[in-house]
Image (cartoon, rainbow, N blue to C red):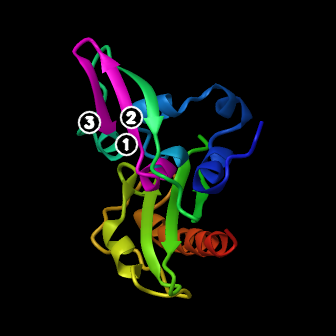
Amino acid sequence: AAHIPGVLGDAVDSAGDQQARNRATIGGTLASAAPGSDVSAALLVLEATADIVGPNGSRVATVAGMLDGSESLAPGELITAVTLAPAEPGSAYCRLANRANLHAICGVAVTLAFGRNGAIIRCRVAVTGALSFPQRLTQTEAAVIGAKPPVPLTIQSGLYYVEDSFASAAYREYMTGRLAERAFASAVARARNA
């Protein structure tokens, strides 16, 4: 199979094990809205939407809405397509895996683009596994717009990190910051080499 470049390829290559990757679908991943889904973080930064058909007709839902529950599937509905925004020159996904279920204890996806002057003109950051559902970090994104790398990617405050038997909230918060730095650096490198 051909390798998928960028953030989506990173997330797909990280997801589950080989059996799970061979059987899983993007639609099934969205429908389950698993809080530690690698692919969901990538779809968030790719500003994906889902075409949905059901007994009451068809509609388009944002991936963000599907993941936060505001646009989840109703009984009898089916995802027929997933549409991605045009790819940015730089993107990456980094994660810390839960060895028990192969979901992300924490994962961070980043996409970015540079302007002619070398400053960041677009940036999207999403986290999975560390919060109650995968979500974009819009304040983190806004903080780097207009900056020229190297620039620190600082995770916004006020997030409520999950605490469970796999990791503490403090550990997830720490790892979100470290993984964001790695994903951001990888996205910058890919953008510069595009």
Q: Say whether disc 3 or disc 1 marks the residue closer to the N-terminus.
A: 1
Could you tell me the amino acid type at mark 3?
Glu
Is label 1 in a helix, a strand or a loop? helix
| Residue lying at 28% horizontally and 28% vertically, measured from the top left | 59
Q: Please tell me which residue is depicted at 55% across the width and 51% down the height of the picture.
A: 104
Which image quadrant is residue 55 in? top left
Question: SS at mark 2?
Answer: strand
Q: Residue at x 54, y 86 (%)?
A: 149
Q: Which residue is mark 2?
A: 50
Residue 189 percent across, percent down from the top left: 66, 74
Region in magenta: 41-61
In-image side of 15 versus 165 (left or right): right
Up-down relation of residue 135 to residue 74 (above or below): below
Which residue position holds label 1?
A: 63
Is there CB contact under 8 Å for labels 2 and 1?
Answer: yes
Q: Position of residue 99 (x, y in %)?
A: 64, 47
Q: Is residue 165 visible?
A: no
Q: Is residue 15 magenta?
A: no
Quick check: 136 above or below 65?
below
> Mark 3 falls on what kind of element?
loop
> Which is more toward the observer, 92 or 173?
92
- Mark 3 vs 2, N-terminal side: 2
The C terminus lies in which quarter of the figure? bottom right
Q: Is residue 150 left or right of residue 56?
A: right
Q: Amino acid at mark 2?
A: Ala
Q: Which mark is residue 71?
A: 3
